[in-house]
DNA sequence: GCGACAG
DNA sequence: ATCTTGTCGC
């Protein structure tokens, strides 16, 4: 699975901001997809001492939530972490991981904001536009926007507002737990995005004893 | 100028 | 993101 749009990632901060403004015009904020058979979750881990990144993509069967395929890819960070320019740091390794994938997902859940971004083009939008696939932005903390605390029950939402515009939703995936920030990535409405996050969040649970481990980039513990 | 600031 | 210590709730 490879990008439909291939642009340079070797950009200056200013060029990156301009590219975001250009690509933001390609974002579709309505539901635009057929049946969702496979859903992918993506994440990137860091090694702050070696400046290495490891991207992971896990594809699940949308109905049973069984794991269909898992791929990882490591890469050298070539763009600093700058709030608002997050995708220029994390997308290169993620694209490398997607290139290894044999089962293309019909929807991707991202670990970063989508439309809830200063230029309305967070990582989820960038990934969605580049692959032209439905994506959902999902953040543990917000980049910007104000909101009233939603009811404490699972499923409760409150609009996240910036400059008078609803840019996403604060959504509680568990009763009594802090909300996460859901926003449109590409080709999906905010309402549908929240339904998917709710549908996925309570059902997929790792066994209590499971501990996720990552094969070390260099093997300090084995030397 | 000061504070905020996805991961 | 990663790291670490202290605290609260079931």
Image: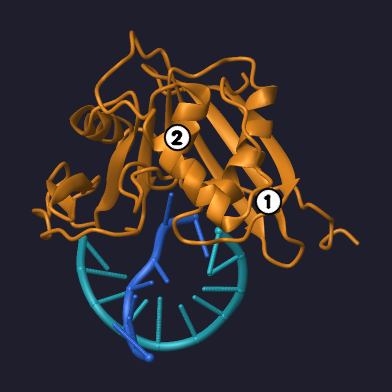
Chain colours: A orange, B blue, C cyan
Q: Disc 1 marks which residue? A: A53
Q: Where residue A143 sits: x, y (%)?
A: 35, 59
Q: Is residue A209 visible in this depiction of the protein?
A: no
Q: Disc 2 marks which residue? A: A23
Q: Is residue A63 visible in this depiction of the protein?
A: yes
In terms of sequence position, does the residue under pointer 2 or pointer 1 come before the other? Answer: 2
Identified at 79% across, 52% down, the residue is A217
Q: Where residue A186 sits: x, y (%)?
A: 36, 29
The local crowd at label 1, few if under 14, some if 14 to 19, many if 20 or more residues have their Cα within 10 Å, is many
Tell me which corner region of the image, top left, top right, bottom left or bottom right, holds residue A68: top right
Residue at the top extreme? A34
Q: Is residue A66 above or below residue A161?
A: above
Q: Where residue C2 sits: x, y (%)?
A: 61, 65
Q: Quadrant of the N terminus of chain A?
A: top right
Label 1: state its secondary structure: strand
Give the CA separation, mark 2 to mark 1: 25 Å
Left or right side of A24 for A102: right
Q: How many marks?
A: 2
Q: Are marks 2 and 1 in contact (CB under 8 Å)?
A: no
Q: Where residue A50 sits: x, y (%)?
A: 77, 62
């Amino acid at each position: 699975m490879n990008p439909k749009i291939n642009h340079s990632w070797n950009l200056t901060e200013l060029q990156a901001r301009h590219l975001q403004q250009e690509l933001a015009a390609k974002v579709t904020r309505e539901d635009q997809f057929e049946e969702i058979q496979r859903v992918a979750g993506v994440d990137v881990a860091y090694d702050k001492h070696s400046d290495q990144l490891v991207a992971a993509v896990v594809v699940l069967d949308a109905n049973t939530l069984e794991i269909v395929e898992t791929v990882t890819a490591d890469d050298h960070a070539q763009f600093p972490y700058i709030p608002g320019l997050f995708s220029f740091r994390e997308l290169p390794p993620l694209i490398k991981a997607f290139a290894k994938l044999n089962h293309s997902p019909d929807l991707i859940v991202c670990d970063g904001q989508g439309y809830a971004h200063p230029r309305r083009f967070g990582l989820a939008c960038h990934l969605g536009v580049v692959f032209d696939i439905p994506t959902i932005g999902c953040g543990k903390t917000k980049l910007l926007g104000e909101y009233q605390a939603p009811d404490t029950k699972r499923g409760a939402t409150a609009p996240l507002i910036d400059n008078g515009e609803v840019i996403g939703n604060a959504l509680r995936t568990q009763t009594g737990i802090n909300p996460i920030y859901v926003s449109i990535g590409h080709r999906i409405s905010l309402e549908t995005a929240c339904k998917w996050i709710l549908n996925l969040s309570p059902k997929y649970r790792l066994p209590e004893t499971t501990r996720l481990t990552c094969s070390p980039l260099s093997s300090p513990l084995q030397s």
